[in-house]
Structure formats: structure tokens, C-alpha cells
Image (cartoon, grey):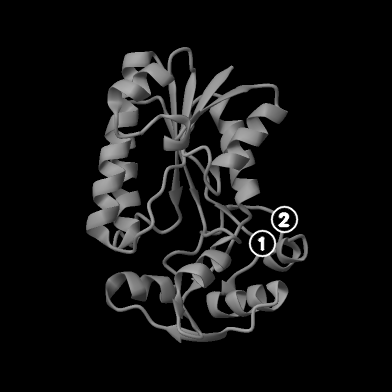
Amino acid sequence: MKVAVAGGTGVVGRHVVSALRAAGQEPVVLSRSQGVDVHDEDGVTAALSGCASVVDVTSVSTTGSRASTSFFEAATRSLLAAGRRAGVTHHVALSIVGAERAPYGYYAGKALQERLVRESGDRWTILRATQFHEFAGQLVSRGKAGGLRLVPRMQSQPVAAAAVGEALAEIAVGAPRGLDRDLAGPRVEDMTSMVRRFLAATGDGGRVLTVPLPGRWGRALRDGSTLPGPDARRAAETFDEWLAAL
């Protein structure tokens, strides 16, 4: 089966591609590095030729709601329209746990993405996952301020990107599920502690400063709104086990 992976070279996308290949499927990577811009509907339509499913794991580096909603609206509309034109029968979207409860900041774009997919018909699956183990390292690279590492005050129940990629690959080759069960890691973590452990594991001596983000999104990151419910699936690998394998 040919399965398109939009954002197939990213943190999660490369794991989706690997899992599809391991299962004997034929992944088709949609990314600018492969000559396909997801905002170009005609180009995406051509790339989707012969694909039964498309997995959307595109992302944008922003914490602002305007930039996030602009990106996800354009990308989602383009992928959905191109999928209809190309005869794709299953649209799989990766969302984030808490997007519906806290549609602010980056999560505003994911909430809009979910709404557009839901309104597209009945041939879709949405998988909400928690933050990835890899997020701690992303914060280290993005949050540098002199010798400090700025980290938002937040709770998370992180999951390995590889586990998310495997779950999406499994979904893509099956029938549409609608809103699937959340996917999370095995335990709740404090993000500041995660970043400190990441720095220790990678030999980085940078100091960590916890910063409470303002507004409703910052409050949601702190109050548990972005944690999974009791019926969520839980991947086995802990953050410390993931660190040990780096």
C-alpha cells in the first residue's frame, strides 16, 4: 500500500516512514526537501497519485496562535483537497493532547486542524499524542539566553516520537477510526526536570531557568489541561530510558 507522509522528514515523520517500510508498505514522503510543498495543492495532488492514505505530521516552529492557525489552516485545507482529487480514502492527522481543551498559542492551530479534518467527511482518523521525549532537547536549542536555558513551567506525560510514528503507521493501513484514543508516555514529568536531565545526559552545563508563560495557554501548560485522560494508551518507554539510549 502506498501511504503519503506529509512532514515525513521531521521528528515524527521519519519514524512513520520507517515503520511503514518495516511493515512492507510504500511510504511517499511529502516535504520541501523532496520537492513537495504541502501548501501547493496541485503539487500535493500529483504526489498523492496512487496513495490510499495520507498521514499529516507537518508542524511549524511557533508559540503564537496567529502563526500556528495560519500554517495549519493552509496545510490542512491543501492536503484534504488534494486527497479528494487524488482519490485518497483515509486522512490521518496527528494532533496534540489538550488542543481542544486549551486552544491557545501553538495549540490554537492544532485545534483548527482537528476541526477541519472532522468537517471533511468520514474518512479520517485523528490521533492526539502528548509532548515527545525529544521536546526537552528542542527546548534546550530554542530557549538559549546567554548561559541560561529558559524552560516553560509545565507538566507533561511525554512519549517517544518513535512510538507515535509506529502508531500512526498502523492506523494509516487500516480503516478510519475517527477520534482515536490519546497516546501518552508512562508517567507525568516536570519539564524543568526533564531539561536538566537532558543537559546532564548530553554533557551540557547550561543553567536552567523556569519561566511561567503568561495567558491562558501558559496556565493550561501548568494546570494539567495538556495531560491525557485515564483511558489513554500508554507507551512503555520512559524519558530516562529514552535518554539512556541517546
182 sits to left or right of 217 = right
C-alpha gap between disc 2 and disc 1? 6 Å
For image coordinates 71% across by 61% down, the residue present is 242
Which SS class for mark 2? Answer: loop
Write down the quadrant of residue 132 in the picture. Answer: bottom right
Write down the quadrant of residue 152 in the picture. Answer: bottom left
For image coordinates 57% across by 66% down, the residue present is 137
43, 52: nearer the viewer: 43
Q: Quadrant of the N terminus?
A: top right
- Residue that mark 1 sits on: 186
- Residue that mark 2 sits on: 236
Q: Earlier in the sequence, mark 2 or mark 1?
A: 1
For image coordinates 71% across by 65% down, the residue present is 243
Crowding at label 2, few (<14), some or many (≥20) Cα neighbours within 10 Å?
Answer: some
Q: Position of residue 148 (x, y in %)?
A: 49, 85
75, 164: nearer the viewer: 75
Under mark 1, the amino acid is Pro
For image coordinates 59% across by 70% down, the residue present is 188
Q: Position of residue 154 (x, y in %)?
A: 47, 75
Against 123, residue 137 (above or below) is below
Against 233, residue 81 (above or below) is above
Q: Quadrant of the C terminus?
A: bottom right
**Circles 2, 1 touching at the beta carbon (< 8 Å):** yes
